[in-house]
Image: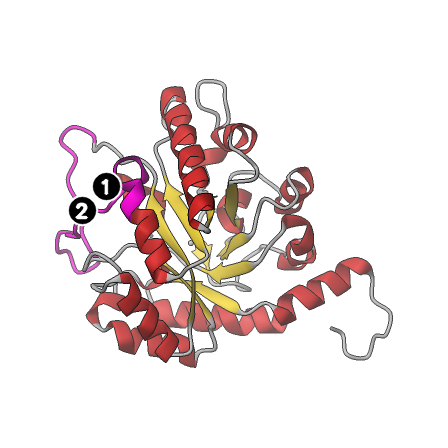
Amino acid sequence: MIKRRNFLKQTGAFAAGSLFLSKQSMAYFETTVTKPVGLQLYTLFNIIDNDVRGTLQKVADLGFKEIESAFSKKGGYYGMKPKEFSALLKDLGLSWKSHHVLGAPFKLPAGAKMPTMPDGKPMTIPIMKNLKANQDIIIEEAVEAGIPYLVCASTPIGTLDEIKQSIEILNKTGEACKKAGITFAYHNHDAEFRAVEGAVPYEMMLKETNADTVKFELDLAWAIKGGKNPVEMFNQNPGRFPLWHVKDLDAKHETIMPVGTGTIDFKPIFAAAKTAGMKHFFVEHDMPADPFASISTSITNLKKIA
């Protein structure tokens, strides 16, 4: 499994008979039933560029309604311009809600080599834009695409200086996105919850970014792997988590699994959706061996959980 954060570093997720429900149960029922299920396309990274339309048609056929895009081996938006990709999604009955971009570029360690794909061939993708150097064009493209959310997928946090510089970029991007009519958010992995020089990056981000302009896309599994309780996070920072990534974890919190096949109890998390401010959630599985088997299981189990 290639974690998205490592990938980025190397190159550049009712009981029908009951009439009386608790407030928590009702909140869970309403949230799960009324929110369309979305998919983060990074799940399909290894296959989507081979047949973009065909792959997205299969996604729609499985019942997914919303899309969050990421980077592509073809560059741009899976080899297309923003309006072109948006038109394709609309033609397939899919709604484009969010796009992932890089915060600041990561520096490759001396002597480091590009990773290889599952077939053993070297990974080659076009240079990715980043918010430090390309903020204006990234936001312009998001406006052209007509998407309501722009998300920083990852940014350097290896040192205290890197964390501070990344926070500065997040704040600047948040302000620029607000002016453009877009909501900006930051997506986590588990590294953000580990102390760096005595400080916890995620805690710094929450405290030192503008709550009005910088929101968060909480990757539930990575947060849990990092030792956090999502419900407690929502209670401590209500309204700051409009986007979620939904994936599961094994008992050791080491291996990502399709939703409903691992150990995460999603019911109390979804029950707290209103507190979180959740507007959209996206199934994600980082580099699964069989992407369609994974997302088919995830969407089926999400419906069963409801």
Residue 145 image-quadrant placement: bottom left
Of labels 2 and 1, earlier in sequence is: 1
Tell me the kind of residue under disc 1. Gly
Farthest residue to the right: give it. 20
Residues packed near mark 2 inside 10 Å, few (<14), some (14 to 19) or many (20 plus): few
| Magenta span includes 136 | yes
| Residue 181 screen position, x and y as percent | 46, 51
| Residue 43 screen position, x and y as percent | 36, 61
Q: Spatial distance from mark 2 to mark 1, Cα to Cα? A: 7 Å
Where 1 falls versus 134 (above or below)? Answer: below
Highlighted magenta segment, given as a residue range: 109-137
Q: Residue at x 63, y 70 (%)?
A: 34
Q: How many numbered tags mark residues here?
A: 2
Q: Residue at x 37, y 41 (%)?
A: 154
Residue 159 image-quadrant placement: top left
Kindly state the secondary structure of the residue where label 1 is placed: loop
User: Which residue is more in the foreground, 257 or 285?
Assistant: 285
| Magenta span includes 99 | no
Kindly state the secondary structure of the residue where label 2 is placed: loop
Tell me the kind of residue under disc 2. Ile
Which numbered marker is on residue 198? none
Instruction: Judge from the rendering whether residue 72 lies leftward or rightward of residue 209; answer left or right.
Output: left
Residue 92 image-quadrant placement: bottom left
Q: Which residue is mark 1?
A: 12
Mark 2 and mark 1 in contact? Answer it, CB < 8 Å. Answer: yes
Q: Which residue is mark 2?
A: 127
Instruction: Judge from the rendering whether residue 2 lies leftward or rightward of residue 51; answer left or right.
Output: right
User: Which residue is more in the foreground, 300 or 95?
Assistant: 95
Farthest residue to the top: give it. 197
